[in-house]
Amino acid sequence: MRVDAKTMLADAGLASAAVSGSSDPVMNRLDCFERGGGLGETRVSEESTLTQLLKESPFQQLFDLSCTRLERTAGEVEIAMRYTASVERSPGTRQYHGGAIASLIDIAGDYALWAVLGYGVPTINIRIDYLRPASDTNLRAQARVRRAGRTVGVVDIDVLDDQGRLIAIGRGTYGTKEG
C-alpha cells in the first residue's frame, strides 16, 4: 500500500495544503507554516514535520526516531535513533540488535526518497554491511538519494554512532512509481 505525502500529513494532523503554487502538498503545507499561515503563528520546520511522521507508525514507535536534517533538493535526510532497551540484542548488553539498525537504514532510505518525490515508496531490496557493534550510544542514519528514477530509486545510507564512527553502510532500492 502506498501512502502519499498528503495522507501522511493528514495522519500527522497537518492536513489541508492551504497554499497554491506547487503541486507538492507537503511543500505547500510547509510553505504555509513558514509564512506563519498554519496553526496560528507557529513555524514548523521540515525536520519537525518528518519527526511527527516518524512517530505515527506503530512499528517506528518501537524506536525513538527523530529527523535532525532534511534537504529536499539534495535528497538527503538524517534520522537519529536514541538508545533504548527495546533495541538491545540481549538483555543487559546495551548493544544494538542488527534488526534495529537495519530498520533505521530502511526507514532513512524511504524518507530520503519521500523528501524528493513527495510520497512514500515500497522497499524492493536493502543491503547492509555491519562494520562494528554499536553499544550504549545513539545512532544517526545519513541517507542520500543516488537515483530517483521513473520506477526505481536508490539510496545510500551511513549509520554513525555518537562519536562519528561508521557502524554500518546500507543501500536501499525502492519502487518509485506513484500509485
Image (cartoon, rainbow, N blue to C red):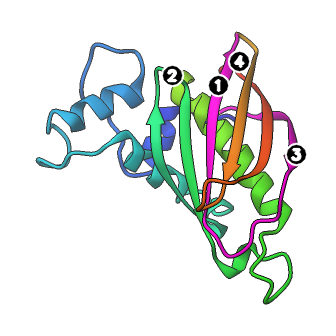
Name the residue type under label 1: Val
Label 1 neighbour load within 10 Å: few <14, some 14-19, many 20+: many
Answer with mark 3 or mark 1, whichever residue precedes in sequence: 3
Residue ID at (15%, 33%): 35
**How far apart are the alpha carbons under marks 4 and 1?**
16 Å
- In the rendered view, would you say 128 is above or below 94? above
- Label 1, secondary structure: give it: strand
The residue at which mark 4 appears reads as 177
- Residue 24 in the image: state x and y as whole percent: 42, 21
**For the residues bearing labels 2 and 3, Cβ distance under 8 angstroms:** no
Tag in front: 2 or 3: 3
- Residue 113 in the image: state x and y as whole percent: 61, 28
Q: Quadrant of residue 161?
A: bottom right
Residue ID at (63%, 37%): 143
The residue at which mark 2 appears reads as 74
- Label 3, secondary structure: give it: strand
- In the rendered view, would you say 135 is above or below 152? below
Label 4 neighbour load within 10 Å: few <14, some 14-19, many 20+: some
Q: Which residues are magenta?
A: 121-149
**How far apart are the alpha carbons under marks 3 and 1?**
18 Å
Q: Is residue 36 magenta?
A: no
- Residue 52 in the image: state x and y as whole percent: 45, 54
- Label 2, secondary structure: give it: loop
